[in-house]
Image: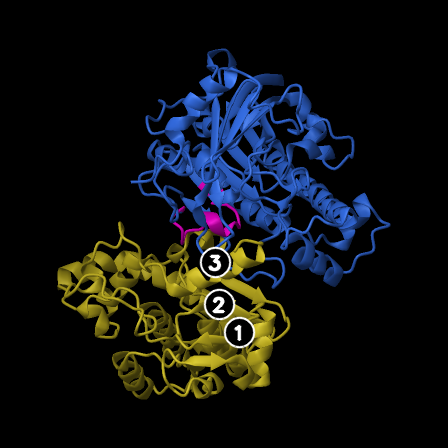
């Protein structure tokens, strides 16, 4: 990322203010929870890496241990993201746990697009499918499909929280990703429910816009995955993430007039499921 | 400048409201608005189900104007768009998948909540009105604190829509003697409603009862919403348009729910406009395509050329015109069978219906035969004039 000193100086006041607000939220959380009761989610993407970096800054400044981190291996991953995360896990001395729903992977014969039979899944996965109202007896193993996504991500997330007794978990979500998040607060309490352990979610970079995220990278030289330089704007599963503008780094694209996430497969399936239950089709 | 709120109640029939003659007391709050509202007694939606109706309401155009529908056609102008361009804050809160971001309805909105990000219960796949109310009230608070810009809010409640499984507290408000369990209600939905099985009148009556309980429920959400407006001190600055997208059938014409039919229980909407300082009944024939132009008028903006309807206000300027509806069979096969298409045209009290694939006509005099039992198509010469007006719309989308 090319940044001139002049540009850095121009952006610094705005970015500092945004980062200060994030640090406030983080410090407030630190005052309420023990280090061992907290965790950080990290996807290797620009938002969660920024979040992780700011938390790390706070820990360095306040001379405390950084909370453990977790990432979900949804099987259909970019090697570049994996390598990026491995590199900084070492450099930043992180306790990073890679979580993967191996039961689903096994039932799919470890191959994308294979059909998974519900009866081949373990009790937890079957219970989760029941909870979300999935009534069919099989589904294709595609990480961005609603059913697949739910099992690969949501189940592993909740299992991690249970397994490691996490009371508060940091996430890199931002308000401007979805206009419905406009009311979202930095703190979101998840009440205990069937298959969901009670926990608090903290979103320190909620107030950053997409453009401001990249400004922070420019000002502080925060590391990022090289895929963004190639033109990816948003990184999810490998097969469904597409280069938005080939060869144009994410921060140079027209962020204000185009959408960050193009329509994803799982939205369609979710919608079809709802329509079916509303009596259509 | 006043704010405009469009409150749409999914699947609510006109005849459950006291302002339209019901004596069942299912909607005390909505009825209480009657004295301060214009009540349109003759209206028609652009179609008998959501996909056919919402283009009419929110884009002032007809369902099949752009061929077989695949989400919101890019050529249509959504009401949010000209309003947003004029600097009015636009917000939409609903949980009907047919109006989701995924299907292209998130255009021109400053805030658009379509609930697709939130989890719903396995059997009740929409967000309850009181939860939507919480989100709306949070937004309204920010909106009011933030300044003086006028807003347009589209708020939609799904609670009257099937599967008809009301909670105990609402059952007790209407019929405490009703003791169906959740499983029994679901069984009724799956085995009677979904199968369109009208053979047992007692079961159809039970479905209707459950439906009516949901009407009572939605009345409480409406009351709660108006309560927020009042608490924030903005109720006096709001015009609220209340209507539905379509109704529901309970064997008036051999069916249940809302399929491709053109009878009044499906396509005659309730339509109230509250807060304009005008009140009383209006018996001019109006269409749901007139709602968007009315909203434009209320904000003092120039009429939008793309809108096919006409502003309902001022009342004296509203022209006498016919109302048109169309639909096709959504259910018979995946994606629906567009060759089972049906069209409807009404002028004053005469309504004609055409089943294109059967080349079959129906005609009703809604004044003398409001329940549409007596097909008079072969008896009146007037039918030829009406057929001529309907003809251009039939299969116009076929290339």
Residue picked out by circle 2: A202
Q: Are marks 3 and 2 on the same chain?
A: yes
Cβ–Cβ below 8 Å for labels 2 and 1?
yes
Q: Are marks 3 and 1 on the same chain?
A: yes
Residue picked out by circle 1: A168
- Residue ID at (38%, 55%): A176
Residue nearest the observer in this picture, A201 or B207: B207
Q: Colour of chain B?
A: blue
Membership of B103 in magenta stretch: yes
Snapshot quadrant of residue A64: bottom left
Q: Are marks 2 and 1 on the same chain?
A: yes
The stretch of residues the image draws in magenta is: B91-105
State which chain is coloured yellow: A
Residue B51, horizontal then vertical, whole percent: 47, 44
Q: In the rendered structure, which disc, 3 or 2, sits on the residue that comes first in sequence?
A: 2
Marker count (numbered): 3
Element at label 2:
strand
Q: Would residue A75 appear left or right of B33 to someone viewing this image?
A: left
Residue nearest the observer in this picture, A133 or B389: B389
Q: Which numbered dot is residue A271?
A: 3
Image mark 3: chain: A
Residue nearest the observer in this picture, B262 or A246: B262
Residue B363, horizontal then vertical, whole percent: 56, 25
Q: CA distance from mark 3 to mark 1?
A: 31 Å
Q: Would residue B78 appear left or right of A157 to someone viewing this image?
A: left
**Residue B223 visible somewhere in the drawing:** yes
Q: Which numbered dot is residue A78?
A: none
Cβ–Cβ below 8 Å for labels 3 and 1?
no
Element at label 1:
strand
């Amino acid at each position: 990322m090319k940044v001139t000193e002049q540009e850095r100086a121009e952006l610094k006041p705005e970015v500092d203010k945004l980062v200060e607000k994030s640090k406030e939220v983080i410090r407030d959380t630190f005052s309420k929870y023990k280090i061992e009761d907290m965790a950080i989610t990290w996807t290797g993407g620009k938002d969660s890496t920024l979040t992780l970096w700011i938390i790390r800054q706070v820990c360095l400044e306040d001379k405390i241990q950084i909370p453990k981190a977790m990432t979900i291996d949804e099987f259909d991953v970019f090697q570049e993201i994996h390598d990026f995360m491995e590199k900084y896990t070492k450099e930043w001395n992180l306790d990073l746990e890679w979580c993967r729903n191996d039961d689903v992977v096994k039932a799919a014969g470890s191959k994308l697009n294979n059909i998974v039979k519900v009866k081949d899944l373990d009790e937890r996965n079957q219970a989760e499918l029941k909870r979300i109202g999935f009534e069919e007896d099989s589904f294709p193993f595609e990480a961005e499909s609603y059913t697949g996504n739910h099992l690969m991500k949501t189940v592993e997330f909740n299992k991690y929280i249970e397994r490691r007794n996490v009371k508060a978990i940091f996430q890199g979500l931002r308000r401007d990703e979805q206009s419905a998040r406009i009311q979202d607060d930095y703190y979101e309490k998840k009440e205990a429910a069937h298959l969901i352990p009670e926990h608090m979610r903290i979103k320190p970079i909620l107030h950053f816009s997409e453009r401001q995220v990249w400004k922070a990278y420019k000002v502080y030289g925060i590391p990022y995955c090289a895929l963004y330089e190639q033109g990816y704007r948003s990184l999810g599963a490998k097969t469904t993430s597409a280069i938005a503008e080939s060869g144009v780094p994410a921060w140079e694209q027209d962020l204000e007039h185009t959408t960050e996430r193009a329509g994803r497969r799982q939205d369609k399936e979710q919608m079809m499921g709802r329509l079916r239950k509303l009596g259509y089709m | 400048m006043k704010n405009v709120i469009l409150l749409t109640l999914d699947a609510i029939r006109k005849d459950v409201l006291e302002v339209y003659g019901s004596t069942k007391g299912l909607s005390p709050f909505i009825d209480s608005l009657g004295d301060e509202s214009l009540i349109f007694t003759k209206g028609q939606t652009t179609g008998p189900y959501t996909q056919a109706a919402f283009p009419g309401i929110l884009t002032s155009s007809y369902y099949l104007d752009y061929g077989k529908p695949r989400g919101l056609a890019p050529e249509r102008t959504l009401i949010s768009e000209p309003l947003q361009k004029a600097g009015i804050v636009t917000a939409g809160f609903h949980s009907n998948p047919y109006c989701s971001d995924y299907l292209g309805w998130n255009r021109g909105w400053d805030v658009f909540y379509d609930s697709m990000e939130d989890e719903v219960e396995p059997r009740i796949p929409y967000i309850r009105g009181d939860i939507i109310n919480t989100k709306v009230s949070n937004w309204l608070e920010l909106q009011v604190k933030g300044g003086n810009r006028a807003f347009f809010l589209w708020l939609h409640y799904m609670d009257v829509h099937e599967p008809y499984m009301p909670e105990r507290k609402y059952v007790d408000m209407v019929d405490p003697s009703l003791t169906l369990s959740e499983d029994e209600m679901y069984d009724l939905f799956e085995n009677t409603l979904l199968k369109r099985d009208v053979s047992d009148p007692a079961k159809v009556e039970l479905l209707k009862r459950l439906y009516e309980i949901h009407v009572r429920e939605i009345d409480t959400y409406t009351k709660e919403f108006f309560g927020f407006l009042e608490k924030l001190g903005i109720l006096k600055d709001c015009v609220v348009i209340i209507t539905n997208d379509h109704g529901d059938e309970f064997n008036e014409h051999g069916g249940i729910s809302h399929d491709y039919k053109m009878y009044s229980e499906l396509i005659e909407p309730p339509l109230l406009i509250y807060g304009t300082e005008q009140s009383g009944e209006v018996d001019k024939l109006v269409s749901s395509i007139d709602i968007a132009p009315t909203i434009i008028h209320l904000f003092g903006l120039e009429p939008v050329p793309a809108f096919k309807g006409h502003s309902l206000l001022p009342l004296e300027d509203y022209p006498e015109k016919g109302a048109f509806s169309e639909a096709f069979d959504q259910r018979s096969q995946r994606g629906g069978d567009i060759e089972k298409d049906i069209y409807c045209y009404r002028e004053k009290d005469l309504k004609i219906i055409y089943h294109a694939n059967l080349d079959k006509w129906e005609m009703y005099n809604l004044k003398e035969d409001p329940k549409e039992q007596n097909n008079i198509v072969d008896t009146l010469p007037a039918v030829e004039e009406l057929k001529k007006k309907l003809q251009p719309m039939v299969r116009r989308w076929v290339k």
